Amino acid sequence: MKKLLQIIYISRSTFESHDVTNKIEPNVARILAKSRMNNRVNGLVGVLYFGDGVFFQCLEGEEDAVNSLLTKLEVDNRHKDLKVISKKYIDNLSFGDWAMKFAPLDEQIKQFLKENNFQTFDPYLFSGEIINKFLNLLFNSHDVSSDLNQANSLNLAAKNVQDKTTAVNSAQLKSNLALILSIIAFVVSLITFFSSRNIV
């Protein structure tokens, strides 16, 4: 039986942060989307937090898959100063089917930082106890990106209904126009017929 491994790493982003859309920084949203896709393929789960230009990520899965991803992360130019702050074997996966849960900067996390005397998010200064508390907070936090995905799905469904309605209305309009033109053609042909017989 293959061993399950959990790692927690932190790193600093090398990209310039842009305006946050739907509570997710656009560069992070792209990283998140790709991570979810790749992690599903590799059987990995975990959680990602990004705040004040710093990543905090917990990854879990089979040892080989986790180590393989860590090797790729170490040469990823989207971040620097990568530091593994925890690495341990686990009996079960903590994050169920979360290919990559995303925790946004919300009031709960702001309160957590304040309670632990941090002005900004700097896990490089976290003690082991604070790391465990923070991971537990992320585990129980709400994933705003799932709301975003649900909203996008609803918007897509609404657009599909609207497109179908537009297509039906367009077809109905064309059908009505064809009927009107047929009636006009019929009337013109009657007028022509009767004119040729000098009846009209």
Image (cartoon, rainbow, N blue to C red):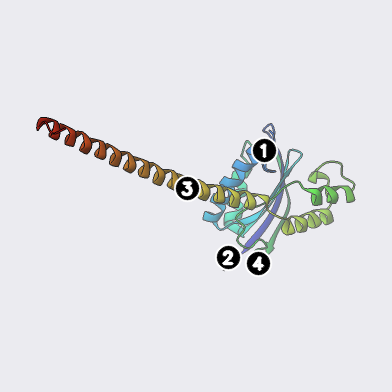
* x and y percentages locating residue 16 in the rendered image: 69, 31
**How far apart, in angstroms, are the residues tagged by discs 3 and 1?**
39 Å
Q: Which mark is residue 79?
A: 1
Dot 2 or dot 1, earlier in sequence: 2
Identify the amino acid type marked 3. Asn
**How far apart, in angstroms, are the residues tagged by discs 2 and 1?**
30 Å
User: In the picture provided, is 183 more to the left or to the right than 54?
Assistant: left
Dot 3 or dot 1, earlier in sequence: 1
Whether residue 64 is situated above or below residue 185 in the rendered picture: below
Identify the amino acid type marked 2. Lys
**How far apart, in angstroms, are the residues tagged by discs 2 and 3?**
45 Å
| Residue toward you, 20 or 73 | 20
| Residue toward you, 36 or 160 | 160
Quadrant (top left, top right, bottom left, bottom right) of the C terminus: top left
Of helix, strand and loop, which one carries label 1?
strand
Identify the amino acid type marked 1. His
Q: Which mark is residue 92?
A: 4
Q: Nearer the viewer, mark 2 or mark 3?
A: 3
Q: Which mark is residue 2?
A: 2
* x and y percentages locating residue 106 in the rendered image: 77, 48
**How far apart, in angstroms, are the residues tagged by discs 4 and 1?**
29 Å
Callouts 4 and 2 close, C-beta under 8 Å: no
